[in-house]
Amino acid sequence: MEWRTRKKRNLNTEMNVVPYIEVMVVLLVIFMLTTPMLTQGVDVDLPQASSEAVDSDDHEPLIVSVDRDGNFYINVGGDDQIPVDADAILTRVRGVLNENPNKLLLVRGDKNVAYDRVIQLMVLLQQAGAPSVGLVTE
């Protein structure tokens, strides 16, 4: 009788992470491609400045924009691509602040617009009852 020696096979107990890495790379590429498409509001050429981000519990701030021609836009109460007048700004901002007094207000001003026009917008926001206004930069 011949004895056959059997070799024990050791099981590989390590987890194969290659499929997970491939999924993460695909997700990263998808996010990198879709993020630039998520810009909101009017196309304005923002001034360059170094600043810290504003902390807010509110997920969507109220953004009022001024384009290079001095037209006002607001991201509440209609199409944010249609210019609005000063009365509409006052009405919409007052309505939002009545519902949420702690709403974050941001001004996006084109760097080529007259400084006076941005100040006029900030005065309108103050008249509407805004306690503070942030300026958006790149």
Image: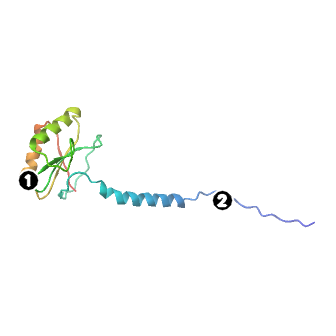
| Picture residue at 10% right of the left edge, 45% below the top | 85
Among all residues in the image, which is located at the extreme left? 116
- The residue closer to the viewer here, 12 or 23, is 23
- The residue closer to the viewer here, 42 or 4, is 42
Instruction: Tell me the distance, in whole angstroms, between the alpha carbons under discs 2 and 1.
Output: 68 Å
At label 1, which amino acid type do we have?
A: Tyr
- Mark 2 nearby-residue class (10 Å; few <14, some 14–19, many ≥20): few
Image quadrant in which the N terminus is located: bottom right
At label 2, which amino acid type do we have?
A: Asn
Residue 127 in percent (x, y) is at: 10, 38
Determine whether 89 is above or below 9 in the image: above
Mark identifier at residue 115:
1
- Secondary structure of the residue carrying tag 1 is helix
Q: Is residue 55 left or right of residue 119?
A: right
* Marks 2 & 1, CB-CB < 8 Å contact: no
Among all residues in the image, which is located at the extreme right? 1
- Mark 1 nearby-residue class (10 Å; few <14, some 14–19, many ≥20): few
Residue 10 in percent (x, y) is at: 71, 60
Residue to which mark 2 is pinned: 12
Residue 98 in percent (x, y) is at: 19, 32
